[in-house]
Amino acid sequence: MTKSWILTDIENRVYVESAQISATALGMAGNWSVTKSRLKGGISDGVDIIEVDNGASSFVIVPTRGMNLWRGQSKGLRLGWDSPTKNPVNPMFITPLEQGGLGWLKGFNECIVRCGMNSNGAPGPDRVVDNNGNVAEVMLTLHGNEANLPAKYVEVQIIDGDPAEIVVIGVVEEARPFCPQYRLTTRMSTFVGSKRLDIHDDVMNFADSPCEFEMLYHCNFGQPFLGKDSKLVVPALEVAPRDARAQEDIATWQRYLEPVAGYVEQCYFMDMAARADGSTLAMLRNAEGSCGVTVRWNRNQLPSFTQWKHTTGLNEGYVTGLEPAVNYPNAKMFEREKGRVVTLKPQQHYAIDLAVEVQENAAEVAALEAEIAKVADGRSPVVHPEPIAKWSKLD
């Protein structure tokens, strides 16, 4: 049996500012709850959050910001990072064109951020057909618009079972006349007592014409998983530095530094091995191997992977990003040239499955390392000492 609560439905003028759903109130087993509230004051004013507590793990979803995952915890281990931007930012305070197209960063503090849907890479020029049918140059900003679009529909479902499943559904649209029209429908779910959150996204082109599509999942983690000598464990087949800066430390691409004030980011592009069904994974574990966090996805849906290292000072945003994506986060013109920009036909759907889970002890970390080794199937990655033309624009 499924119980349902609609919290937002703008087409039917439904909006619930606060709600509390719990096992106790429903007479169900378990110590779980779902709480909807609205933040007040400062640049968080007007931001809706949904806190899901399954009894073992908790997750905070932000409908006002593209249904992103702000933060969470599992067995006392924190999911997320310490951004200089401390709290969720209402999109009304974001100016994407600020600082040469980097204004998106003003709201960047979530654990999992969707970057897309029209673009997801570095800011820069692109050429599009304008409303008069002419080719015009436009400025694309960092990581697209999705993270700053409020959901038009939000629903909570409780699916009775052993264990029960807690589901948050959201619909986000990115559309305007003479431009692409995307509808993202997301199903974010967890089972009572689980250390895992599953995300199923369905992106639809609801226009009558084809449109291009890019999407990247910026999965960001700090302490306790990130620290000196933490390790990225992946079944990589090929690894290359994005640029000359990343090239400096290609020999230690899997390992991380302690916080270094003023550190300049490094990115590494990868091609991953996968099982026959396309499933693959990446784990960040601490130096001791006593805890880890794993991201799972399907390579058939998200064929590109980027490791983002930003091991700067603790007050500057000490973090790493594990980023499965449709394409690499380069300028869109470059990605189009390399054939990595997807074209969606009218009414076409693009499905994406992603999950994040926590390893709370050394035995669980070792089991994940063994799983990753099995996916790699004895293959070691080809590690390029410098950027390569298929993944980076070489001057």
Image: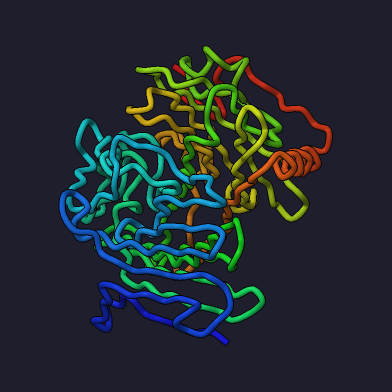
Residue 332 in view (yes/no):
no
Outermost residue on the right side: it is 378
Name, please, the residue furthest toward the bottom.
1
Considering only vertical position in the picture, is 167 above or below 359?
Answer: below
Q: Is residue 208 visible?
A: yes
Q: How is the image coloured?
A: rainbow
Between residue 98 and residue 44, name the one nearer to us.
44
Above-or-below relation of 386 to 89: above
Q: Position of residue 109 (x, y in %)?
A: 35, 43
233 relative to 136, above or below: above
Q: Quadrant of residue 235?
A: top right
Q: Nearer the viewer, residue 315 or 338?
A: 315
In depth, the one of 186 and 30 nearer the eye is 30
Q: Position of residue 311 (x, y in %)?
A: 45, 24
Q: Please indicate whether residue 189 sits to the left or right of residue 209 in the image.
A: right
- Taking the spot 46% from the left edge, 16% from the top edge, the residue there is 245
Q: Is residue 119 left or right of residue 235?
A: left
The quadrant of the rendering that contains the C terminus is top left
- Find residue 211 and report its horizontal and vertical position in percent: 41, 57
Q: Residue at x 38, y 23 (%)?
A: 313
The residue positioned 50% from the left and 19% from the top of the image is 246
Number of dots carrying numbers: 0
Left or right position of 217 against 94: right
The residue sitting at the top extreme is 248
In the image, is 278 to the left or to the right of 327? Answer: right
Q: Nearer the viewer, residue 93 or 166?
A: 166
**Quadrant of the rendering where the N terminus is positioned:** bottom right
Percent from the top left, x then y, of residue 377? 82, 38
